[in-house]
Image (cartoon, coloured by chain):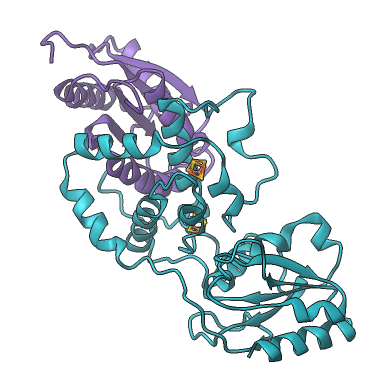
Amino acid sequence: MPSNFEPKIIAFLCNWCSYAGADLAGTSRLKYAPNIRVIKVPCTGRLDPLFLMKAFEVGADGILVSGCHPNDCHYRSGNFLARRRWMVFKDMLEYAGIEPGRIHFSWVSAAEGARFVEVVNKVTDAVKALGPFGKLGK
Amino acid sequence: MIDKLKSRVKELLEAKTIGVFIGYEKGDNPALARPVMITAPDEASRLIYDDTCVAMLSKYLLKPEVKALDRRGVIASYSNLRAITGLIQEHQLTRNDVYIISTSTNDKITNLYDEVIEMSIKDYKSDDLDKKITEMMKLSPAERRAFWNKEFSKCIKCYACRQICPLCYCNRCIADKNQPQWIPTSPNPAGDFMWNLTRAYHLAGRCVDCGECERSCPVGIPLMLMNKMIYNNVKSNFGYEAGFDATVPPPLATYNPEDKENFII
Ligand code: SF4
Ligand code: SF4
């Protein structure tokens, strides 16, 4: 693995909590690993697992999904429903041979700029350690 | 017992209890019976029931032309009963739409049949897969990825697995949508992966473990090796097995605030 490998990480952030948390990190001028490409989604409940597979298909090395903490969801239950899907989905990916370190889930609230930084750095380190994903199906 | 089935179907059609009966008749392929829709009482004599009767009949219950012949009668093996339970649970059928002749009594599926005519056939069993799944998990991720890449790359996108699956009933499948196209339709490596994992995932918590997809796959992809892993996963995460209770929501369509979240960073 090239030591200067910089992973591409797609971060799906929910509009109401994690995206605002990322914003707060920015306005607070906190520094974090520059490897994420953010996609804002209305709610983690809106995330079709297809989106996550597509990210791998188009060249992501890793994925971060982040939403509101349980009981803080703007739509009340979106994150609870999503959590169930992730449980099965991540195990299915692992079984299919995609290392668990490539896909991460977190809760980050709009007030947690510092936590957002911590999460992004942690995910980036994990994906870096795994090296490039290569191509889906290859 | 086949004579009993023939005479019961004749009676049911004569009495207009049902408008059509879905069963099996002898087809061109000696190894595989052909599903048949019987609408005239005299044609009930065509029915057969033996080890070649494996195709899932529940699929036909949803066809518009069959629906039009209300009310639908069907002969249901254990797998078919579970599939029908799933269809009722997902509001594709109501219990009253179907007259079910079960081939066995079953404690786990109560109240789902109208009568029983005991007939045993070789039913699909996925039990031996559990050992293989444990073996799979002992491999490294790279080895598993290589295994599935090799298997999925055989896929010719015929969609037989989808067409046969009793719980795959969308009028327009995500695999057929091209605006935008989430699943590449040509047999290329990425598309093979997207299609096969999407199919398996869409059946998560819904797959009734009937084995039909794998049986139908013309290129022999071990689809049940994937399905059964998900089946077991849903069972251990949510204590749920599909096809036994039509009155509860499917596990991935609901939630429990107390669901475990030890995987969340
Ligand atoms: S075993 Fe295959 S065909 Fe049967 S319900 Fe599950 S996915 Fe569908
Ligand atoms: S039946 Fe087999 S070859 Fe056909 S689409 Fe399904 S997995 Fe692919």
Seen at 26% across and 30% down, the residue is A102
Question: Can you name the residue that lies furthest to the left here?
Answer: A3
**How far from the left and from the top, in percent, is residue B88?**
65, 66
User: For this view, does B25 lie left or right of residue B217?
Assistant: right
Seen from the viewer's position, the closer of residues B136 and A3 is B136
Seen from the viewer's position, the closer of residues B43 and B111 is B43
Chain B display color: cyan
Seen from the viewer's position, the closer of residues A51 and B62 is B62
- Say if residue A44 shows up in the picture: no
Picture quarter containing residue B127?
bottom left
**How far from the left and from the top, in percent, is residue A25?**
31, 17
Give the total number of marks visible in the rendering. 0
Quadrant into which the C terminus of chain B falls: top left
Quadrant into which the N terminus of chain B falls: bottom right
User: For this view, does B65 lie left or right of residue A46?
Assistant: right
Chain A display color: purple
- Say if residue B62 shows up in the picture: yes
Question: Is residue A34 positioned above or below B24 on the image?
Answer: above
Seen from the viewer's position, the closer of residues B160 and B207 is B160
Seen at 43% across and 58% down, the residue is B256
**How far from the left and from the top, in percent, is residue B198?**
47, 40
Question: Is residue A98 positioned above or below B133 on the image?
Answer: above
**How far from the left and from the top, in percent, is residue B63?**
76, 56
Seen at 30% across and 12% down, the residue is A28
Question: Is residue B178 positioned above or below B234 on the image?
Answer: above
